[in-house]
């Protein structure tokens, strides 16, 4: 009887040790992200903001969050979160809050494909007052549909999550503003969210009719009438999918996720375009989207896709700066080779510098 417990002791020790190692490694995981970022200040509604009140149950904390999720007074914002772009996401969130007149009425929906709890903890630490919900995006839903593009960064499954927002977000959310992680707002997002969608439009985005639309698809596509006829009764223009106002209810009703997937399935069999998640959006929605002023997507600031050259702003007013393209402002700032406009991103950077005294 005495030998039994003695024999199990080392086992117990090993179990405890491995438990300790497991928990300390996941702690390291969380802390490497969370301890890197500063806490953002709290932002308050101005007096004339709509108040999101709870009619049913005042004391229930969980309900507190739920009533924001389903509120039509709230401005709903969807973004993806991953470890690579978390610094960009944090800057984007900060910029949204800072320029909003009703920051407490903004609800964030974050879609992650992995490390969700770690990323959520990082967001909570930097934005303790933020109303948000995390969603797990199952990569396998889309990974079989992705064909390689000219830029490998575009082939990441999470890049396609925007096509699944209507399925991922709760049914009660009828309209959402989708934002990429490499942008900052310098204007009130409520104005963008209020973009009128005429009777037939499912989404709104700035359109660029001077861009050469032909060049987004291959000659295989244009020379095949059954394919190119998809644009026969439309006047499609290029739009960037990094900033979109989406009517989720109409999207669901029209089953547009399925339509996007059908083009992706075709792309796997015959190459009809070269870029990643963008062309299926052009195929499904091009020519039928509601216009948004160009000020809401000053895109391309990441620069040239091949050499990373600096780009200038397009003429006109600016409400949103978007570093789409290969170069990212945080990487160029870190490398001490910033483009002139990267200085506009820097004030929103929450990364803790080694020498900063505040925390
Ligand atoms: C961090 O978390 C990820 C996903 O949860 C896991 O795969 C990885 O092994 C973890 N890394 C460490 C150092 O614990
Ligand atoms: C999860 O987090 C770990 C540690 O931060 C990182 O090394 C890994 O790449 C992350 N996984 C993904 C898929 O982002
Ligand atoms: C538009 O792009 C196509 C394909 O890349 C090219 O053949 C055509 O000459 C371009 N048109 C203009 C007006 O630049």
Image (cartoon, rainbow, N blue to C red):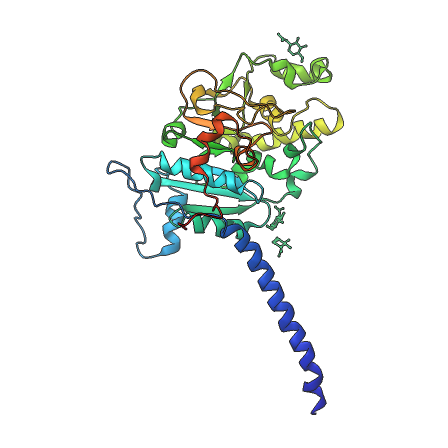
x and y percentages locating residue 216 in the rendered image: 64, 19
Q: Nearer the viewer, residue 103 or 223?
A: 103
Q: Nearer the viewer, residue 234 or 163?
A: 163
Residue 40 against residue 197 in the figure, above or below: below
Q: Residue at x 38, y 38 (%)?
A: 97
x and y percentages locating residue 81 in the rendered image: 54, 42
Q: Residue at x 35, y 39 (%)?
A: 103
Instruction: Name the quadrant containing residue 239.
Output: top right
Q: Is residue 33 left or right of residue 70?
A: right
Residue 225 against residue 170 in the figure, above or below: above
Q: Nearer the viewer, residue 299 or 286?
A: 299
Q: Is residue 189 left or right of residue 89?
A: left
x and y percentages locating residue 40 in the rendered image: 39, 45
Q: Where's the N terminus, which quadrant?
A: bottom right
Q: Residue at x 31, y 51 (%)?
A: 56
Q: Residue at x 30, y 45 (%)?
A: 53
């Amino acid at each position: 009887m005495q030998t039994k417990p003695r024999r199990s002791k080392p086992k117990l020790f090993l179990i405890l040790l491995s438990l300790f190692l497991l928990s300390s490694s996941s702690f390291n995981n969380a802390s490497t992200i969370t301890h890197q970022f500063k806490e953002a200040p709290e932002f308050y509604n101005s007096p004339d903001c709509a108040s999101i009140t709870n009619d049913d149950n005042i004391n229930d904390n969980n309900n507190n969050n739920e009533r924001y999720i389903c509120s039509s007074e709230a401005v709903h914002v969807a973004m993806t979160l991953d470890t690579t772009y978390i610094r960009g996401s944090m800057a984007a969130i900060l910029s949204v809050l800072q320029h909003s007149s009703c920051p407490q009425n903004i609800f964030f929906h974050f879609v992650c494909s992995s490390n969700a709890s770690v990323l959520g903890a990082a967001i909570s630490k930097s934005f303790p007052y933020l109303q948000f919900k995390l969603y797990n995006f199952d990569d396998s839903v889309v990974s079989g549909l992705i064909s390689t593009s000219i830029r490998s960064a575009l082939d990441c499954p999470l890049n396609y999550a925007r096509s699944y927002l209507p399925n991922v977000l709760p049914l009660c959310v009828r309209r959402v503003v989708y934002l990429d992680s490499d942008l900052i707002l310098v204007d009130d997002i409520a104005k963008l969210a209020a973009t009128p969608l005429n009777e037939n439009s499912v989404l709104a985005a700035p359109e660029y009719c001077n861009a050469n639309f032909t060049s987004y698809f291959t000659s295989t596509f244009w020379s095949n009438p059954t394919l190119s006829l998809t644009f026969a009764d439309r006047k499609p223009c290029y739009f960037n999918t990094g900033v979109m106002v989406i009517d989720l209810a109409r999207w669901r009703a029209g089953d547009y996720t399925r339509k996007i997937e059908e083009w992706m399935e075709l792309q796997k069999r015959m190459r009809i375009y070269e870029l990643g998640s963008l062309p299926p959006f052009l195929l499904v929605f091009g020519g039928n989207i509601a216009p948004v002023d160009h000020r809401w997507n000053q895109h391309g600031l990441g620069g040239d896709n091949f050499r990373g050259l600096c780009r200038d702003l397009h003429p006109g007013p600016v409400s949103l700066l978007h570093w789409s393209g290969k170069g990212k402002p945080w990487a160029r700032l870190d490398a001490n080779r910033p483009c002139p406009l990267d200085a506009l991103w820097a004030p929103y950077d929450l990364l803790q510098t080694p020498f900063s005294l505040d925390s």
